[in-house]
Each structure stands twice: as C-alpha cells, then as structure tokens.
Image (cartoon, rainbow, N blue to C red):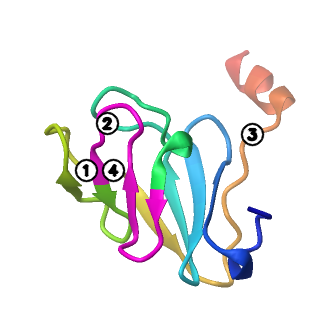
C-alpha cells in the first residue's frame, strides 16, 4: 500500500493510541488497541467491502462506521470517529510536548 486512498485502503498508526484508516473514500480515526485483550489493530484485517476491522489476536470484528462489535469474544465497542474531508487527522504530540506536560 502506498498510503494514498485512491490506491486502496490504508491503515496507519498516528500516535500510540490511534489509527488513521482510509477506506472507500472515508477517513476514520479509531483506537489502536482492541478492547478485548489490547491486540494491536494495525496488524488486523481491514475489509474494504464491509468496512470492518478484525483484531489479529482473537478475531473480534468491528464495524468502522459505528465501532460496534459484530463478532468475536465479547468486549464492547471500538472508539471510532469519521473525519469530514476538510478536517486533518489528529497528530501525536511531539516528544518535547509530552515531557513538558509531565513537569
């Protein structure tokens, strides 16, 4: 994948807690870890036809438009946010920002 939505779906980490998913003309920010056992969703399976993301650990599957869990071990919903076209994705804080806020 090249990272351009017109080339197909993309899924990339944007900081420790979030993923940016670009699929079917949509940009979605989702939590980076599965609520079941904290599986790293960036290594999951992204189905661009059904707009679902499956965790690589225990195969919990989530609807990317609602965050609702549709299969797998009971674990609740995934936090998702559909971004409008004119809104940039959130950026992770710079390393210096994290240190300054901890002081």
**Marking on residue 77:** 1
**Marks 2 and 1, Cα distance to the nearest angstrom?**
7 Å
Which of the marked residues, 2 or 4, is nearer the chain's N terminus?
A: 2
Asked if disc 1 and disc 3 are in contact, CB closer than 8 Å, the reply is: no
Q: Which residue is mark 2?
A: 35
| Residue found 38% across the figure and 42% down from its top | 55
Asked if disc 1 and disc 4 are in contact, CB closer than 8 Å, the reply is: yes
Residue 90 in magenta stretch:
no
Which of the marked residues, 3 or 4, is nearer the chain's N terminus?
A: 4
Quadrant containing the N terminus is: bottom right
**Marks 1 and 4, Cα distance to the nearest angstrom?**
4 Å
Q: Is residue 61 left or right of residue 32?
A: left
Q: Nearer the viewer, residue 46 or 64?
A: 46
**Marks 2 and 4, Cα distance to the nearest angstrom?**
7 Å
Q: Is residue 21 left or right of residue 70?
A: right
Q: Which residue is mark 3?
A: 93
Which of the marked residues, 2 or 1, is nearer the chain's N terminus?
A: 2
Q: Nearer the viewer, mark 1 or mark 3?
A: 1
The residue range painted magenta reads: 46-61
| Residue found 76% across the figure and 64% down from its top | 3
* x, y percent for residue 80: 41, 59
Quarter of the view holding residue 50: bottom left
Quarter of the view holding residue 58: top left
| Residue found 72% across the figure and 43% down from its top | 92
Q: Which residue is mark 4?
A: 78
**Marks 3 and 2, Cα distance to the nearest angstrom?**
23 Å
Quarter of the view holding residue 83: bottom right
């Amino acid at each position: 994948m090249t990272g351009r939505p017109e080339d197909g779906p993309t899924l990339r980490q944007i900081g420790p807690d979030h993923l940016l998913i670009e699929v079917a003309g949509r940009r979605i920010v989702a939590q980076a870890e599965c609520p079941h056992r904290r599986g790293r969703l960036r290594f999951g399976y992204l189905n661009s036809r059904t707009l679902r993301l499956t965790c690589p650990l225990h195969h919990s599957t989530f609807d990317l438009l609602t965050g609702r869990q549709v299969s797998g071990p009971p674990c609740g919903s995934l936090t998702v946010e559909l971004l409008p076209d004119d809104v940039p994705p959130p950026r992770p804080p710079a390393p210096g920002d994290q240190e300054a806020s901890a002081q």
